[in-house]
Image (cartoon, helix red, strand yellow):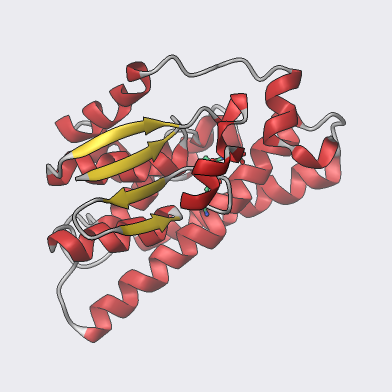
Amino acid sequence: MIKFYYHPSPNPAKIALFLEESGLDYELMPVDTRKGEQFEPEFLKINPNAKTPAIVDTDTGATVFDSTAILLYLADKTGQFLPEDKPAVRAEMLSWLMLIATGIGPYSGQAVHFKHFAPEKLDYAINRYDFEAKRHWGLINDHLEGRDFMVGDSYSIVDMAVWGWGGPVPFVMGEDAWSLFPNAKRLFDWISARPAAERAGALKQKHAFKTEMDDDAKRHMFPQNK
Ligand SMILES: N[C@@H](CCC(=O)N[C@@H](CS)C(=O)NCC(=O)O)C(=O)O
């Protein structure tokens, strides 16, 4: 059984989708990051980086943190949602997974931070992260031109990684941002229409997560300001 340390946000969404798609048995372990639960000593033993998602696999004793590592672990464990097992295809899968992990995620996160949450509106920072978030989504969009999936011709963990960050696209880059990325939007919509994606999205209702980004939440989320 998988213990799934979860908050309703983009990186955990990738894992929620995998768990729902694969049918693996899992237990939801809410971590309310707006209340600072990511810093509790018991959780830090599971993820020293104090972020969601993380998992504990009680079948194997494995603890895995960081969404890309978890996707790879679960895909290897189940043999599901992996593209064709050939070195060239695996290399392509790893390349795109890392681009999403190091490009889409961090630049989107910083774009949100400087646009919506930073105490001062810094034009330079807003412009830089908006530009980089759009540049990375542009790479995904261009790659999806004339193809249904990110790698090979089947739905894989790379598509799930894209989907996780698809939800907040308008919040990250503006209300009309999807119009810039029609191929990525097509993939996002295709996944969102799947019953597993609906179930993954509904997980946020299984716990009363704090939704306000008040001063207390900001102290937990942006500890440099303490
Ligand atoms: N590289 C990590 C990033 C994890 C991450 O930033 N998680 C966010 C949610 S999307 C979080 O837990 N934020 C709480 C915080 O920063 O305190 C991954 O891909 O899992």
Report the number of numbered marks. Answer: 0
In front here: 64 or 88? Answer: 64
Q: Is residue 72 left or right of residue 218?
A: left
Where residue 197 appears, x then y in whole percent?
24, 33
Report if residue 53 is visible in the image: yes
Name the residue at 55% across, 61% down: 102
The picture quadrant where one finds residue 150 is bottom left
Above or below for 150 versus 200: below
Please state the quadrant of the image where ligand 1 appears: top right
Residue 187 to residue 31: above or below? below
Spot occupied by residue 167 in the image (x, y as percentages of width and height): 42, 33
Q: Is residue 141 visible?
A: no
Q: Residue at x 52, y 27 (%)?
A: 32
Q: Quadrant of the C terminus?
A: top right
Q: Nearer the viewer, residue 149 or 19?
A: 19
The part of the image, by quadrant, that contains residue 198 is: top left
